[in-house]
Amino acid sequence: MESKQVVKAGEPEATYQLYETGSSSKEIYVDGIQGASFGGPVVKVNFFSRGPGETATPGGIEERELACRLVMGIDTFAAIVQLLNRIDGDIKKQLAEQAAVKKA
């Protein structure tokens, strides 16, 4: 099976290369997170999806389907949180810059 390089990056501790091999990686669209649990050294995070137009009306019940459950070690979870916080900051900065350009 042929693989292709997806990312080559460096961090203070290490340099790494991420490869994708055929159908080994899947993209799964999710609409949100529906809870998480942890016990011992493992964290489980449940992601859900819903069909088009399937949002709850006041007093109604929204139907959600478990799209995937990510299971990872606590260290991995902490690294993901740190990465997502950094991405969140980058997005907010970019949106603020775009808003400033529009006002000018």
Image (cartoon, rainbow, N blue to C red):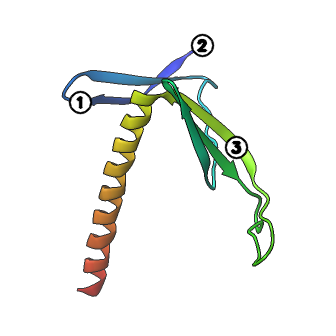
Tag in front: 1 or 3: 3
Other residues around mark 2 within 10 Å, as few (<14) / some (14–19) / many (≥20): few
Tag in front: 2 or 3: 3
Q: Is residue 27 above or below residue 95?
A: above
In primary-sequence order, the first of circles 2 and 3 is 2
The part of the image, by quadrant, that contains residue 45 is top right
Given contact means CB atoms under 8 Å apart, are the residues at marks 1 and 3 in contact? no
In primary-sequence order, the first of circles 2 and 1 is 2
Q: Is residue 66 above or below residue 21?
A: below
Given contact means CB atoms under 8 Å apart, are the residues at marks 2 and 1 in contact? no
Label 2 SS: loop
Q: CA distance from mark 2 to mark 3?
A: 27 Å
- Which numbered tag is attached to residue 1? 2
In primary-sequence order, the first of circles 1 and 3 is 1
Q: Residue furthest front?
A: 40
The residue beneath circle 1 is: 11
The part of the image, by quadrant, that contains residue 70 is top right
* Amino acid tagged 1: Glu
The part of the image, by quadrant, that contains residue 27 is top right
Seen from the viewer's position, the closer of residues 46 and 11 is: 46
Seen from the viewer's position, the closer of residues 62 and 59 is: 59
User: Residue shown at 59%/29% (left/top)?
Assistant: 25
